[in-house]
Amino acid sequence: MTVRAGILGATGAVGQRLIQLLDPHPDFEIAALTASGDSAGKQYRDAAKWRINMQIPDDVAEMTVGETSPDAVPDDLDIIFSSLPSSVGAAVEPEFCEEGYVVSSNSSNARTDPDVPLTVPEVNADHIDLIEVQRDERGWDGALVKNPNCSTITMVPPLAALDEAFGLERVTVSTLQAVSGAGYSGVTSMEIIDNAIPHIGGEEEKMETESRKLLGTFDGAEVSWHDARVDASCNRIPTLDGHLENVWTDLAESATAAEAEAAMEEYPSLDLPSSPDQLIHVFDDPSRPQPRLDRDRENGMAIATGGLQETEGGLQFNCLAHNTMRGAAGASILNGELLLENGYL
Ligand code: NAP
């Protein structure tokens, strides 16, 4: 079965990554592109300031960008990938779901709504069935599924590995986040070159809440959030792609660095088309992972960790993921693959 996919916000930083990953995808075919009113009506090659180091696929370059409205996209789309600013997503994503479209979204709106699945397939694939609750409550034929914020997704798989093996009680994280995480017009060169910005609006709260929902349990009716306390401090630095994070954990059972390394390396990946062969790569070299060297592992879909050290009551480590691939476009596509595997498309 070929799955016909639309992309909302197709001209942006994440939208371009969605095109890069969907164009060669074995199951999905790009069937519609939308963006703001400034781009609508233009050919994609004229509407998008393309910034990825590959050419725009020829068939995509010639597509006409449409308005972002359920009335303006083909009726026969099987899935919609959304990479809209969250204020726009909050307004239009429910309209698509009401019209029967299944939406896999990057935007931060609705991620912590009780009836919206927030999923990282390797960590909490079972939460996808929250769709049944959502459909009952909202009367939708469509569905809304979210992937988490890019900084959250970077730390959650290693935290899930530690939680499963030793029990997670507390998390403290400090981030070093790349400029592409802010979108193309997010941070100007005058602000970020030769600089670091110790604040990213709303990011700390996203890490503190979304991680607990992802690590929570779903009983068929609701998700009970994990009760670990999570504290985050978020910083923007002048790297292009790849968020690096320093994480401290308190664990219920003591773990040596070697035991934690084994738990992370053995944490299973899935057999979905975009899954990495190995989800978490652990470095022994304490100077790794590094954004430029390690963000592209396994097509940008792996998480890299390193610097594992025992601390009083827990463990310290560093982790890294490609924020627009594993942290955004690739995460939405993995959720799309999960939806397909579970019969929701
Ligand atoms: P971006 O580069 O600013 O792109 C925004 C996209 O939305 C563009 O295609 C833009 O179209 C379109 N858009 C803007 N206003 C619109 C409107 N009123 N109606 C319809 N379309 C509109 O942003 P991004 O970095 O790709 O982020 C997209 C979403 O993903 C955000 O919600 C962000 O929080 C989330 N996210 C981003 C990352 C990341 O690493 N960048 C990671 C995880 C999640 P025009 O080109 O026509 O303006």
Image: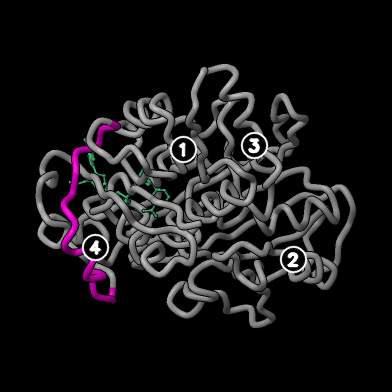
Q: Secondary structure at mark 2?
A: helix
Gap between marks 2 and 1 measured at Cα: 33 Å
Q: Nearer the viewer, mark 4 or mark 3?
A: 4
Per the image, the residue denoted by label 4 is 60
- Are the residues at dot 4 and dot 1 in contact (C-beta closer than 8 Å)? no
Query: Which residue is at a point 48% across and 56% down the rendered structure image?
Result: 327
Gap between marks 2 and 3 measured at Cα: 20 Å
Q: Quadrant of residue 94?
A: top left
Which one is earlier in the sequence, the residue at label 3 or at label 1? 1
The colour scheme of the drawn protein is: one colour
Mark 1 Cα shell of 10 Å, populated few (<14), some (14-19), many (≥20): many
- Residue type at mark 4 is Val
Q: Nearer the viewer, mark 2 or mark 1?
A: 1
Which one is earlier in the sequence, the residue at label 4 or at label 2? 4
Nearest the viewer among 13 and 142 is: 142
- Are the residues at dot 4 and dot 3 in contact (C-beta closer than 8 Å)? no
Residue 21 picture location, percent across and down: 41, 65
Gap between marks 4 and 2 measured at Cα: 38 Å
For the record, the magenta segment spans 53-70
- Residue type at mark 2 is Met
Q: Secondary structure at mark 3?
A: helix
Which one is earlier in the sequence, the residue at label 4 or at label 3? 4
Q: Nearer the viewer, mark 4 or mark 2?
A: 4
In the image, residue 66 lies in the stretch drawn in magenta: yes
In the rendered view, tell whether residue 51 sits above or below residue 137. below
Per the image, the residue denoted by label 1 is 102
Where residue 264 is drawn, which disc sits there? 2
Mark 2 Cα shell of 10 Å, populated few (<14), some (14-19), many (≥20): many
Query: Which residue is at a point 44% across and 42% down the rendered structure image?
Result: 105
Residue 46 picture location, percent across and down: 10, 59
